Image (cartoon, rainbow, N blue to C red):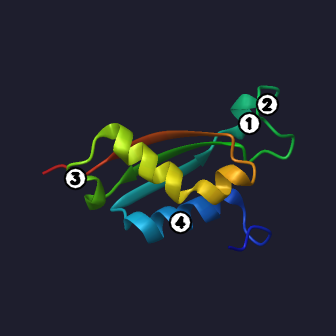
Amino acid sequence: MRLELTNRSTRIREVLTQVFAPQSLEVDDQSHLHAGHAGASPEGETHYKVTIVSEKFHGMSRVAVQREINKALKNEFESGLHALSIKASAPAG
């Protein structure tokens, strides 16, 4: 993985797109909202919100979906991602 060549938002987007082929995906860096809090870094890129819709989530519990997303982003958590807020669902209909 090219950790040093891209920012964390781009890497998160790339990994989630590759693993889940989402119909929609939003990745929001919310690190500025957590300045001075535990896990925050002066450089940012520590706290994110992800909103994702994927067919792959059909039939999965909320906990199972969150586990799969966290597993997909394991390298990011190991390299400084501190918190991830997840809003995930399968497409309606």
In front: label 2 or label 3: 3
Q: Looking at numbered disc 2 in the image, what kind of residue is underneath it?
A: Ala
Figure check: 17 above or below 33 = below
**In the displayed structure, does residue 82 sit left or right of residue 12?**
right
Where is residue 62 shown, x and y percent of the image? 33, 39
Q: Looking at numbered disc 3 in the image, what kind of residue is underneath it?
A: His
Q: Which residue is mark 2?
A: 35
The answer to whether the residues at label 1 and label 2 have Cβ atoms under 8 Å apart is: yes
In front: label 1 or label 3: 3
Where is residue 27 shown, x and y percent of the image? 54, 52
Q: Report the residue at 57% width, 56% height from top.
A: 73
User: Helix, strand, or loop for circle 3?
Assistant: loop
Q: Report the residue at 44% width, 56% height from top.
A: 25
**In the displayed structure, does residue 67 sit left or right of residue 39?**
left
Q: Which residue is mark 3?
A: 58
Where is residue 57 shown, x and y percent of the image? 29, 53
Where is residue 71 shown, x and y percent of the image? 51, 54
Q: CA distance from mark 2 to mark 3?
A: 36 Å
Q: CA distance from mark 1 to mark 4?
A: 23 Å
The answer to whether the residues at label 4 and label 2 have Cβ atoms under 8 Å apart is: no
Q: Which residue is mark 4?
A: 15
Q: On residue 32, which mark appears? A: 1
